[in-house]
Amino acid sequence: RGEIEAALKKKLPKLIEMKNIKGDLHMHSTYSDSTATIKQLTDFARKLGYEYILITDHSQSVKYAHGLEPKRLYKQWKEIDNINKQFKKLRVLKGVEADILKSGKLDYPDKILKQCDLVVAAIHQGFTKNVTERICAAMDNPYVDIIAHPTGRLISQREGYVIDIHKVMEKAAQTGTWLELNAYPDRLDLNDVNLKVAKEMDIKISIGTDAHSTEGLLWMKFGVATARRGWLEPKDVVNTYSLKKLLTVRKINKNGVN
């Protein structure tokens, strides 16, 4: 896929490494369907040397995963505030994994999304119904920062969504939305081929483990390995940013929304 030619021209990229990762941008707690509390995730992330983690529990329409209605979401955020008071070297960011409905709208109103540090959006139902249009509509929302597991594949379990991934990438490039490389071993979504295309389109990638346990945070290594296969460099992956840079360059600022 061009490695030999690049080597001959001495233009091989300096690929991303685990040491470049400063945080994990997709994980779940016991508020939804994880076995780990926010405190346990925080303690484990501190041992990994992370600067930040993003808590992204399921949203209210994902009933099978105990998705959070607004009241429980606000309760979670209070707990996050208390945890952040205890630790100075790691910041727990307030997020959600908002469900993209069949209409293309999200299952939380903007007044909630705007209070998040970062918003992850994803398809969890209606895998064959206008998926491309729904994801593109979600990216038009200025509060959506990341599209999780964009193609929806589960390795050896199911094919991905019926989706035009190129159209999704075009919309991501247009709106400044980050696409996820989901590091869960059965996903690895986006795959290496799509990652290389995303890089060529200057689309930034967010690596998230989608952890549902503390041990799940260790899946980051699979994400980094896949990123390397896609020729990604540290500058292509937002997890390599400092906390300050991460929150400064997020989509909400690119679109001039307060």
Image (cartoon, helix red, strand yellow):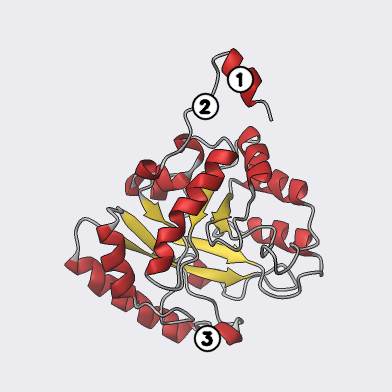
Sequence-earlier tag: 2 or 1: 1
Residue position for label 3: 66
- Decide if residue 155 is on the left or right side of residue 162: left
Which corner quadrant of the image does residue 125 belong to?
A: bottom right
Q: Which residue is mark 1?
A: 6
Q: Where is residue 165 shown, x and y percent of the image?
A: 74, 50
Q: Is residue 54 left or right of residue 102?
A: left
Q: Are marks 1 and 3 in contact (CB under 8 Å)?
A: no
Q: Residues within 10 Å of mark 2 (few under 14, many from 20)?
A: few
- Residue 30's x, y, as percent? 41, 81
Distance between the alpha carbons at the discs numbered 1 and 3? 48 Å
Image vertical order of residue 201 relative to residue 178, above or below: above
Cα separation, mark 2 vs mark 3, equals: 43 Å
Depth-wise, is mark 1 or mark 3 nearer the camera?
Answer: 1
Q: Position of residue 164 (x, y in %)?
A: 79, 52
**Disc 3 residue type (three-letter):** His
How far apart are the alpha carbons under marks 2 and 1? 9 Å
- At 18% from the left and 68% from the top, the residue drawn is 86
Q: Residue flagged by tag 2: what amino acid is it?
A: Pro
Q: Amino acid at mark 1?
A: Ala
Which residue carries the number 2 mark? 13
92 relative to 85 in the view: left or right: right
Quarter containing the N terminus: top right
